[in-house]
Amino acid sequence: MQKKIKIFDTTLRDGEQTPGVALTIDKKLEIANALSELGVDIIEAGFPINSESEFQAVRKISKEVDTTICGLARALKEDIDACIKADVNLIHTFISTSPQHMKYQMGKGEDEIYEMAISAVEYVVDHGIPCLFSPMDATRSEMPFLIRVCKGVEEAGAGIINIPDTVGVMYPSAMREFMARIRKEIKIDLDVHCHNDFGMAVANTLAAVEAGCNQVQVTVNGLGERAGNADLEQVVMALETLYKIRTNIKTKRIYPTSRLVERLTGIRVMPNFPIVGDNAFAHESGIHVHAVLKRAETFEPIKPEMVGAKRRLVLGKHIGVHGIDVKLKELGIKVNQKQLEEITTKVKDLGGKGKRVVEEDLIAIAEDIIGMVPREERRVELVDLVLNSRLGKKPIASVILRVDGKEKKATEEGVGPVDATLSAIRSAIGREEVTLEEYHLDAITGGSDALADVTVRVSDGKRTTMARGVHEDIVMASVIAFLNGLNRILKL
Ligand code: KIV
Ligand code: ZN
């Protein structure tokens, strides 16, 4: 097997053909610079004949980016001239060789196609520019004709031949066999370009490498026509870690490059996308978190740092005490075992209700629980709450409390549900001197399911205390804050 594979990146050409993507010259240049820093061997910067702005983009990239820059050209003089004018240092010329393309797209027979391929390669070579040749739709071409064309362009001076699986119809064992047949006949380097129509672009690319291919065409985030091209991140990391084949890629630059391309193209990376998706190194289940924190390889095939990503512990219904403990330590929040268990229960409970608990929520929950009077020392606790709130009527709240072990009930109305509930609590405990001096409400994170964070100042005339309550329901956050304050006052 080859020791090293060259990475040909076509994010700026096939990748830009992703429906809905159109990059300005500046954005193309920014991506080209990032690809160069990433260490790709060749950047296919565009198709210069396509438009004036495309031509300008390729020319600017050729001038300013210190990597081999390739331009695409049909097997036509004017296309090749546009590449030469754009000052590229590699020309990728192509012509279709499959029966359906030759008949319906080109309207030409085999001999004419053959002549055009040879002439195009000779024209590039005569200009002293290295030439990459692609028989488009190679994988649906008749093998004898494909070999005839490949041998012809090899003789004409092409430096490398690319085998495109233009409509993504190959599968790994077929690709291995197909590429091996071409490998037997052709001496120069071989390249492969796979589309992902059946989700096999990466596997087919690797199969081509197994059959002796020396270069692979890929795009960042798998962008490209229709379902896209073979994904750079997956191909490179599979080569490096599974096949132990080297590339020139600085793998730590993979994640930042993927994010840059995501931002500039506007095409979001799926959370479950391998290597660079949000979930690629995320762990939620208590069992996984526990094991990964002990030894990463238990549930991670590679370390996230290797591709410039970070491990993420997800605060959801599957999280365990261990994961919360680590997260709190990361945030510099100290808790005792009981508080840790209470925080974990609250996070799991919120997760179970479908709420995405983010760091800010965890901080508020933790601060709320740390500030609470310990459960066994609480003199007042809420047993039940019924709220009756009708349009145009004052809300009525009925509460049942446990005060020093005895049940107390009260019903009150108020200007709003919070006011009615807090009034009912005050009536139930029978301490009219207890007042709510201040009330402040914050939503921790955006959205109508954001956690409500209530801070109150409670006084009984002699003593005053601040307290906090966090809950997904505003009334409950207010009740928790008020009871927190009450329990603190009763303890003083
Ligand atoms: O998919 C394809 O065949 C191409 C060629 C231009 C190589 O993109
Ligand atoms: Zn393509």
Image (tube, helix red, strand yellow):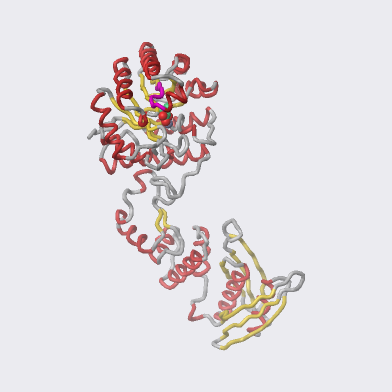
- Left or right: residue 482 versus residue 169 is right
Whether 98 is among the magenta residues is yes
The answer to whether residue 229 shows anywhere in this view is: yes
Percent x, y of residue 187: 25, 23
Percent x, y of residue 162: 35, 27
Q: Is residue 450 positioned above or below 148 on the image?
A: below
The answer to whether residue 40 shows anywhere in this view is: no
What residue is at 34 percent from the left and 35 percent from the top? 249
Q: Quadrant of ligand 2?
A: top left
- Left or right: residue 212 versus residue 119 is left
Percent x, y of residue 383: 57, 81
Report which quarter residue 169 is drawn in: top left
Q: Decide which of 477, 275 is in the foreground and name it.
A: 275
Q: Decide which of 144, 218 is in the foreground and name it.
A: 144
Q: Main secondary structure of the magenta part?
A: strand
Report which quarter residue 36 is drawn in: top left
Q: Decide which of 422, 400 is in the foreground and name it.
A: 400
Q: Residue furthest top?
A: 126
For the image, the number of numbered tags is 0
What residue is at 44 percent from the left and 16 percent from the top? 76
Q: Which quadrant is the C terminus positioned in?
A: bottom right
Percent x, y of residue 491: 54, 80
Q: Is residue 16 positioned above or below 454 on the image?
A: above
Extent of the magenta region = 92-99
Q: Which quadrant is the N terminus positioned in?
A: top left
Whether 478 is among the magenta residues is no
